[in-house]
Image (spheres, grey):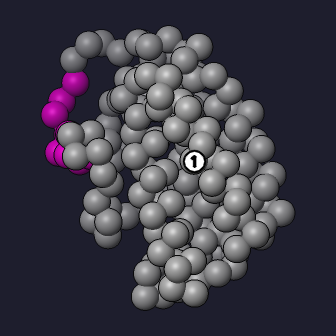
């Protein structure tokens, strides 16, 4: 599991490097700007970590979920298939300064997620119930999805 925590930290560093390009847009790649991609990703990470830190223990059983099962099996997030939940939608024009503050806040919230009980769960609006390790891995899959889009926006600009 440490490899996913390390990957998440590396991804946060990469997102930080893209913050100065917050206003860059490329409609042929995404309707969201680089900054909106970053903001959405940070909101998602922060929200999932906060939910896990509440340490609600899972019951051990849960319903199958097509999206969760597909994402976790393929290790990829489907592009253009799922609309971001309202709670994680970005603002219209996040500035580089705003993103830097949000990044710092997110890093502080993440801390060491392995300190959270591995039995802790969160309820994701699309993926449903996720246990700590699965949620941490999902965060890296979701973040990589948005990093790919950011890289494509940058390459097309």
What residue sits 32% from the left and 66% below the top?
A: 79
Please identify the quadrant where the C terminus is shown.
bottom right
Number of dots carrying numbers: 1
Q: Relative to 34, is 89 above or below? A: above
Q: Magenta stretch?
A: 62-71
Give coordinates of residue 68: x percent, y percent: 26, 41
The quadrant the N terminus occupies is: top left
Horizontal and vertical percent position of residue 8: 55, 39
Q: Residue 22 placed where, x, y %?
A: 69, 72
State the image coordinates of residue 113 (x, y, percent, origin top left): 57, 23
Please check the rendered image and state whether residue 31 is part of the magenta-colored stretch, yes or no: no
Q: Say whether residue 69 is left or right of residue 137.
A: left
- Dividing the picture into quadrants, the one containing residue 72 is top left
Residue plotted at (69% across, 79% down): 23
Whether residue 20 is visible: yes
Residue appearing at x 26%, y 13% in the figure: 60
Q: Is residue 82 above or below residue 124?
A: below
- In the foreground, 48 or 74: 74
Judging by the rendered image, the residue that carries numbered circle 1 is: 11
């Amino acid at each position: 599991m440490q490899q996913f925590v390390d990957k998440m930290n590396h991804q946060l560093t990469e997102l930080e490097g893209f913050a100065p390009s917050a206003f860059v847009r490329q409609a042929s790649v995404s309707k969201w700007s680089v900054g909106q991609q970053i903001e959405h990703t940070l909101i998602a990470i922060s929200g999932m970590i906060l939910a896990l830190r509440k340490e609600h223990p899972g019951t051990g059983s849960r319903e199958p979920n097509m999206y969760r099962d597909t994402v976790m099996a393929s290790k990829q997030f489907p592009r253009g298939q799922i609309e971001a939940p309202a709670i994680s939608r970005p603002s219209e024009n996040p500035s580089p300064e705003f993103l830097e503050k949000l990044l710092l806040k997110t890093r502080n919230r993440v801390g060491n997620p392995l300190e959270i009980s591995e039995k802790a769960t969160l309820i994701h609006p699309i993926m449903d119930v996720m246990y700590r390790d699965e949620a941490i891995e999902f965060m890296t899959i979701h973040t990589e999805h948005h990093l790919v889009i950011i890289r494509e926006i940058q390459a097309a600009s």
